């Protein structure tokens, strides 16, 4: 359809809302908890944190929960832009209601740019890919585009220099060992693991997303709860770090709720831009999640900023299936 022929949606008409929220809920979230709720009030969409979906062991301050909501906020903005609007966002508008993370109004009519359409098209195609990447160099202009995407949201993506890989690999391995040694961490992780054909849940991580066949996925919650596999996980992840085509750390200038929301939007923007360039990404955040190791990540890469996420980027060797999502009805109040 020609852009000029696009229907003028009545601001926040029900069909329009459903369309853009369906894109918003495709956002990534830690353990696929999808910790967001949306309210529609007075012509604006409110984004609320759903803290009943928090991860008290892996994410005790709801930092990643807030980043996940930030990613959903960016997905929503992208969907609205594709639909021909220039959404306006007010973050943390009411200090006495800290769960109200953002208010999004639809804004004026605005013809989407080519990049708006490219990013919106990437929403359905983006999946976390934890598998092997091809031994193919990433063109420098691709990395610049991905870095610019993070910068556009007020965050900073640093590509880790080769000379620092080994030290970062050691920190990731140390983070893995610390997390897996903690039975509380394993119990929490097990709660969000799903079999490959789970029909009951629309959240959590199916085994296939972690590279497991049906049998391994069926037993994964029990195995994860019972055994400290920290050494094995650490060795695997250290190898991923050393062998990654590109390794990047997402930084913000501070560590407030505002910064976390910015980091989440930056994450969404950079992942969608990467997807549009046929790059895949996966996460290696362990030394940031383990609080005692976080200063060492900053000291290694950029001691003046606050590290929020560690990402591996590359051309994927295999494609991955989408993970489930709750429906718009599930998250709309
Ligand atoms: C803030 C944040 C932190 C994440 N941390 C990790 C992580 O440490 N390890 C990992 O394998 N995946 C991590 N993920 C990816 C999620 O598990 C993934 O987004 C979720 O399972 C949904 O799958 P999808 O990205 O394929 O849609 C993280 C995602 C977000 C948004």
Image (cartoon, rainbow, N blue to C red):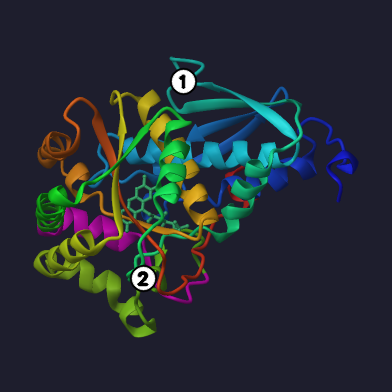
Query: Is 111 positioned to the left or the right of 207 in the image?
Result: right
Residue located 51% across and 49% down the image? 272
Vertical relation: 223 (above or below) 59? below
Q: Check contact, mark 2 vs mark 1: CB within 8 A.
A: no
Q: Quadrant of residue 314?
A: bottom left
Residue located 14% across and 59% down the image? 180
**Which residue is tagged 2?**
134
Vertical relation: 78 (above or below) 234? above
Mark 2 residue crowding within 10 angstroms, few (<14) / some (14–19) / many (20+): few
Residue located 68% across and 43% down the image? 114
In the image, residue 193 lies in the stretch drawn in magenta? yes
Q: Nearer the viewer, residue 104 or 171?
A: 171
Q: Is residue 51 shown to the viewer in this render?
A: no
Residue located 26% across and 53% down the image? 284
Q: Is residue 11 shown to the viewer in this render?
A: yes
Total labels: the figure holds 2
Query: Is 307 positioned to the left or the right of 111 in the image?
Result: left
Q: Nearer the viewer, residue 90 or 85?
A: 85
Asked which secondary structure carries label 1, the reply is loop
Query: Is 107 positioned to the left or the right of 195 in the image?
Result: right
Disc sitting over residue 97 in the figure: 1
Q: Which of labels 2 and 1 is toward the front?
A: 2
- Disc 2 or 1, which lies upstream in sequence? 1
Task: Tell me residue 286's x, y (percent).
Answer: 20, 50
Asked which secondary structure carries label 2, the reply is loop
Q: Which residues are magenta?
A: 180-199
Task: Tell me residue 56's x, y (percent).
Answer: 26, 43
Query: Is 66 positioned to the left or the right of 15 in the image?
Result: left
In the image, residue 330 lies in the stretch drawn in magenta? no
């Amino acid at each position: 359809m020609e852009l000029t022929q696009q229907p003028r949606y009545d601001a926040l008409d029900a069909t329009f809302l459903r369309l853009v929220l369906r894109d918003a809920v495709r956002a990534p979230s830690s353990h696929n908890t999808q910790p967001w709720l949306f309210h529609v009030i007075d012509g604006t969409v409110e984004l609320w944190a759903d803290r009943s979906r928090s991860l008290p062991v892996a994410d005790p301050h709801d930092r990643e929960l807030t980043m996940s909501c930030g990613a959903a906020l960016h997905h929503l903005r992208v969907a609205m832009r594709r639909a021909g609007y220039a959404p306006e966002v007010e973050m943390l508008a009411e200090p006495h209601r800290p769960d109200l993370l953002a208010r999004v109004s639809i804004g004026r009519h605005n013809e989407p740019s080519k990049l708006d359409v490219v990013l919106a098209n990437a929403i359905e195609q983006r999946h976390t890919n934890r598998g092997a990447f091809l031994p193919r160099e990433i063109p420098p202009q691709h990395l610049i585009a991905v870095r610019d995407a993070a910068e556009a949201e007020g965050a900073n993506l640093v590509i880790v220099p080769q000379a620092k890989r080994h030290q970062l690999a050691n920190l990731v391995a140390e983070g893995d060992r610390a997390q897996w040694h903690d039975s509380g961490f394993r119990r929490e992780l097990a709660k969000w693991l799903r079999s490959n054909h789970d029909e009951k849940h629309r959240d959590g991580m199916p085994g296939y997303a972690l590279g497991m066949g049906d049998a391994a996925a069926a037993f994964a919650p029990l195995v994860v709860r019972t055994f400290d596999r920290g050494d094995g996980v650490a060795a695997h992840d250290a190898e991923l770090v050393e062998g990654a085509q590109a390794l990047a750390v997402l930084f913000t200038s501070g560590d407030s709720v505002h910064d976390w929301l910015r980091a989440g939007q930056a994450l969404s923007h950079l992942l969608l831009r990467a997807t549009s360039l046929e790059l895949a990404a996966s996460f290696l955040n362990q030394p940031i999640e383990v609080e005692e190791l976080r200063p060492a990540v900053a000291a290694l890469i950029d001691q003046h900023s606050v590290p929020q996420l560690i990402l591996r980027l590359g051309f994927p060797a295999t494609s991955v299936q989408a993970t489930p999502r709750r429906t718009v009805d599930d998250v709309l109040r």
